[in-house]
Image (cartoon, rainbow, N blue to C red):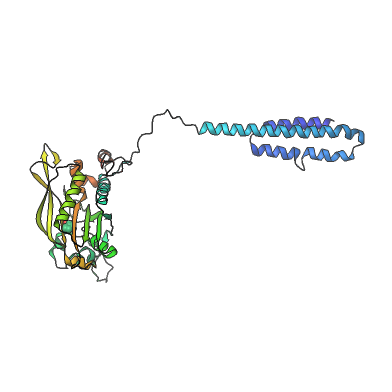
């Protein structure tokens, strides 16, 4: 039968040309589908006489089988080719050199915040936070700084604008992290052990001052705390942070409205040939203010000063970053100079931990 030979040649060619699974399926339907050409011819068998049917029937069946197995074989080879292509595309040369480290670095201020968080966490201090735009009550009044107190002027405060006609006291950019003391007391009550690292703002600008800088506040409240506990915590912190056993601190009597008694703390250091060394020499560098929490402040935080005592401190983060990592100019911290960031920045994956070495 001529028709069979023609169909065979036509469809074997189409099978061979089908470039992907979809094209091959279309060929299969056109040949072997219910309305395909082979099926139509089979339906024609009924009109043939017995003799013709005898040869045409087996020929059509054989064609059907042949096309069917050609299609299966083609499908398998298309699948193989697709897998082959995928393997080639996803191949990875493990002998290539490693990728260069990411170009970004961790800013020294972030690094130091992570370091001090790890050290204080080890002493049982959790991290507390407060807003940078603060009400004057939290920033001043609650900290025993009433409206006419000279400390309000000394702090060179940035005031936020109020809508015209709104005569309430303006909000401020917080001038220190101390308002977080009040927020933490109100939120958690006593006993309490928190640190609060963050940004603070004062109108000041020279080689050692920027209008925005960083502090970390510390606050511990318990039944029986004294200056001795404060001294131990600060010495322990400095030993761990500066990674020097022989750190020496000097407590100088001072005054803050929110602590009584109050002390400023200096660290012994030396400047030789422009090189700063911690723990030796004849110089002292001021790093923090501290003291026993004033009873008015405890009360503002909702804590009974007859039942609880607390100590608090506020430390300059930028200052201790400069000291530890020998960074001379504070203003450069916030200029986003890429060369500076690459030089003083830290690798992103070196997360400070006490077990792993803080600044390893
Ligand atoms: N808030 C003070 C400052 O910014 C530092 C301080 C905090 C002092 C806590 C005593 C207790 O200078």
Q: Quadrant of the N terminus?
A: top right
For the point 9% across and 54% down, the residue is: 252
Relative to 219, residue 237 above or below = above
Picture coordinates of residue 11, whole percent (x, y): 74, 33
User: In the shown orientation, is residue 77 left or right of residue 271?
Assistant: right
For the point 17% across and 55% down, the residue is: 229
Picture coordinates of residue 260, whole percent (x, y): 13, 62
Picture coordinates of residue 71, whole percent (x, y): 70, 34
Q: Nearer the viewer, residue 87 or 9?
A: 87
Q: Nearer the viewer, residue 200 or 180?
A: 180
Relative to 205, residue 134 above or below = below
Residue at the top extreme, as displayed? 95
Q: Nearer the viewer, residue 3 or 252?
A: 252
Q: Nearer the viewer, residue 126 or 56?
A: 126
Q: Quadrant of residue 220?
A: bottom left
Query: Can residue 27 be seen from the camera position used here?
Result: yes
Relative to 146, residue 194 above or below = above
Query: Can residue 173 be seen from the camera position used here?
Result: no
Q: Quadrant of the C terminus?
A: top left
Residue at the front extreme, as displayed? 224
Q: Quadrant of residue 242?
A: top left
Q: How many numbered tags mark residues here?
A: 0
Q: Quadrant of ligand 1?
A: bottom left
Q: Quadrant of residue 226?
A: bottom left
Picture coordinates of residue 338, whole percent (x, y): 28, 40
User: In the shown orientation, is residue 267 left or right of residue 77?
Assistant: left
User: In the shown orientation, is residue 238 left or right of residue 70?
Assistant: left
């Amino acid at each position: 039968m001529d028709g069979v030979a023609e169909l065979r040649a036509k469809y074997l060619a189409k099978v061979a040309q089908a470039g992907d699974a979809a094209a091959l399926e279309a060929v299969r339907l056109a040949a072997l589908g219910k309305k395909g050409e082979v099926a139509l011819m089979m339906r024609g068998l009924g009109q043939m006489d017995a003799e013709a049917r005898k040869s045409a029937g087996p020929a059509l069946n054989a064609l059907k089988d042949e096309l069917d197995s050609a299609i299966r074989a083609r499908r398998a080879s298309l699948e193989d080719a697709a897998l082959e292509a995928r393997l080639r595309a996803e191949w990875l040369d493990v002998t290539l050199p490693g990728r260069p480290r990411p170009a970004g670095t961790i800013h020294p201020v972030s690094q130091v915040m992570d370091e001090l968080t790890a050290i204080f966490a080890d002493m049982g201090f959790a991290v507390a936070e407060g807003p940078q735009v603060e009400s004057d009550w939290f920033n001043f009044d609650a900290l025993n700084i009433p409206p006419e107190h000279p400390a309000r002027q000394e702090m060179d405060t940035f005031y936020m604008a109020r809508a015209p006609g709104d005569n309430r006291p303006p909000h401020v950019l917080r001038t220190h992290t101390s308002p977080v003391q009040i927020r933490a007391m109100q939120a958690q009550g006593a006993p309490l052990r928190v640190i609060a690292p963050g940004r603070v703002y004062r109108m000041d600008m020279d080689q050692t001052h920027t209008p925005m800088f960083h502090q970390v506040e510390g606050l511990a409240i318990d039944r029986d705390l004294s200056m001795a506990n404060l001294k131990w915590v600060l010495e322990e912190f400095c030993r761990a942070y500066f990674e020097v056993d022989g750190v020496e601190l000097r407590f100088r009597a001072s005054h803050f409205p929110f602590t009584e008694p109050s002390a400023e703390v200096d660290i012994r250091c030396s400047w030789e040939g422009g090189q700063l060394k911690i723990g030796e020499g004849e110089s002292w560098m001021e790093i923090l203010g501290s003291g026993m929490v004033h009873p008015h402040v405890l009360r503002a935080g909702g804590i009974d000063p007859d039942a609880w005592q607390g100590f608090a401190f506020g430390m300059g983060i930028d200052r201790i970053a400069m000291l530890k990592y020998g960074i001379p100019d504070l203003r450069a911290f916030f200029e986003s100079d890429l060369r500076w960031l690459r030089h003083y920045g830290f690798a992103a994956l070196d997360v400070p931990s006490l077990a792993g070495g803080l600044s390893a």
